[in-house]
Image (cartoon, rainbow, N blue to C red):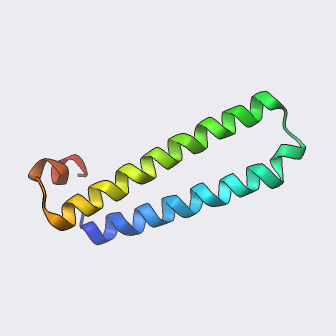
Amino acid sequence: MTSRFMLIVAAISGFIYVALGAFGAHVLSKTLGVVEMGWIQTGLQYQAFHTLAIFGLAVAMQRRISIWFYWSSV
């Protein structure tokens, strides 16, 4: 995997995070209960953390900080 590919994946993942968050806040909040909205919020937090991790690995690969970052992304 190249750093460019990982940046594209991070961008797509960030888009999905924002789109699902907006959909959940504006559409699903009217039909789902508090417990279900909590599940969606937890899932979106996981999506955000993974997006940031992918972005961080892509930046590390661009700068070639450590070979371990490269191998962790394979």
Q: Residue furthest bottom?
A: 4
Name the spot of residue 32 as percent of width and height, x first. Answer: 84, 38
Q: Is residue 48 left or right of residue 33?
A: left
Q: Position of residue 62 (x, y in %)?
A: 20, 67
Q: Residue furthest left?
A: 67
The quadrant where residue 61 appears: bottom left
Image position of 51 with respect to 4: above or below? above
Give left or right: position of 54 versus 72.
right
Number of residue marks: 0
Q: Residue at x 82, y 54 (%)?
A: 26
User: Most extreme residue toward the right, as rendered?
Assistant: 30
* Residue located at (75% from left, 49% from top): 24
What is the quadrant of residue 36 in the picture?
top right
Going 84% across and 32% down the picture, which residue do you hit? Answer: 33
Q: From the viewer's perspective, tell me whether residue 47 is left or right of residue 4.
A: right
Residue at 16 percent of width and 65 percent of height: 63
41 sits to left or right of 37: left
Which quadrant holds the N terminus?
bottom left
x and y, in percent, of residue 13 in the image: 50, 58
72 or 60: nearer the viewer: 60
- Relative to 35, residue 63 above or below: below
Q: Position of residue 35 (x, y in %)?
A: 77, 27
